[in-house]
Image (cartoon, helix red, strand yellow):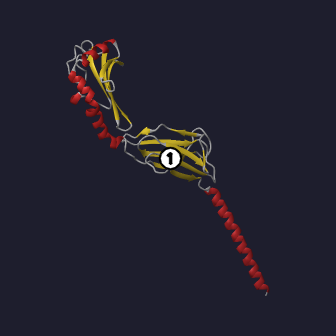
């Protein structure tokens, strides 16, 4: 919503105070389109954009709060209000003119100075339990996935799912020794439900008889969460060994039985 006096063709409407318009920290408004509405096949001759952006800076918890209001036209900041200064400050020649006008308005100035307590603190109290204090522990699993570029049995993938907040540390270990190299990770990806996920792959083929571990550290966990993985036994080789063992055992019983039979016959 454009501040009063910003453009002559735009009607006045309050920006600060109870009618302050906010949207995820910024409000983008297309103010005017030059010329008449375009006919079919014609292009717009131009668009003016005004961005009003409010920042609430919290220092040492909520002990000290600083509010900064920024007024940006076509990606250039014309003026801003800093609660630590207490007045509007121009950043361009036109912004300086507008700042002098707004600083001469006692009601607007009082409203801006009070926004630390009327806007920043109440919004912080309402959002902190969900955005700051919220903790969702991750679920962690290890799977063997095919490698599209390298031969061998595949590669190990550690899937860290459905955690909040976003910062997380994932590490791979081999028999207790960390493997800082040969590790490839995706970006931490939002799920769209205020949780995140990340995939971390170990770019070396797993070996039989070796224990691999994926360790996850996250603010929601009192202790690191670790999942272990070992190469399953070779079923074909196991079947061969079982078959050979069965044959040898049968041969032993056959020899013993034949010996017992011959001994009984001779007696």
Q: In the rendered view, would you say 249 is above or below 204?
A: below
- The quadrant of the rendering that contains the N terminus is top left
Q: In the rendered view, would you say 70 is above or below 172?
A: above
Residue for point 63% across, 49% down: 207
Residue for point 46% across, 38% down: 188
Q: How many marks?
A: 1
Q: In the rendered view, would you say 200 is above or below 266?
A: above
Residue 211 visible? The answer is yes
Q: Image quarter for residue 106?
A: top left
Task: Give the labeled residue for mark 1.
Answer: 216
| Left or right side of 240 for 85 | left
| Left or right side of 187 for 56 | left
Q: In the image, residue 227 lies at what x, y percent?
A: 52, 52
Residue furthest to the right:
266
Q: In the image, residue 193 lies at what x, y percent?
A: 36, 42
128 and 27: which is toward the camera: 128
Q: In the image, residue 229 lies at what x, y percent?
A: 56, 52
- The quadrant of the rendering that contains the C terminus is bottom right
| Left or right side of 16 for 148 | right
Q: Image quarter for residue 249?
A: bottom right
39 and 213: which is toward the camera: 213
267 and 131: which is toward the camera: 131
């Amino acid at each position: 919503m454009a501040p009063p006096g910003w453009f002559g063709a735009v009607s006045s409407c309050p920006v600060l105070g109870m009618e302050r318009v906010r949207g995820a920290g910024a409000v983008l408004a297309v103010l005017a389109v030059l010329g008449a509405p375009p006919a079919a096949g014609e292009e717009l001759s131009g668009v003016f954009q005004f961005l009003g952006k409010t920042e609430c800076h919290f220092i040492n918890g909520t002990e000290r709060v600083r509010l900064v209001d920024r007024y940006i036209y076509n990606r250039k900041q014309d003026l801003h209000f800093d609660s630590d200064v207490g007045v509007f400050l121009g950043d361009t020649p036109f912004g300086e003119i507008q700042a002098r006008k707004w600083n001469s308005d006692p009601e607007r100035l009082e409203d801006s100075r009070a926004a630390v307590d009327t806007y920043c603190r109440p919004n912080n109290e309402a959002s902190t339990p969900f955005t700051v204090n919220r903790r969702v522990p991750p679920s962690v699993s290890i799977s063997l996935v095919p490698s599209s570029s390298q031969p061998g049995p595949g590669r190990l993938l550690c899937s860290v799912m459905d955690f909040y907040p976003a910062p997380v540390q994932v590490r791979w270990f081999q028999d207790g020794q960390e493997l800082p190299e040969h590790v490839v990770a995706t970006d931490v990806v939002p799920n769209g439900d205020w949780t995140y996920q990340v995939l971390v792959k170990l770019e070396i083929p797993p070996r039989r008889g070796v224990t691999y571990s994926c360790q996850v550290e996250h603010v929601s966990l009192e202790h690191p969460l670790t999942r272990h993985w070992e190469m399953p036994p070779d079923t074909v080789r196991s079947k061969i060994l079982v078959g050979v063992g069965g044959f040898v055992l049968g041969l032993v019983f056959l020899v013993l039985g034949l010996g017992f039979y011959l001994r009984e016959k001779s007696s």
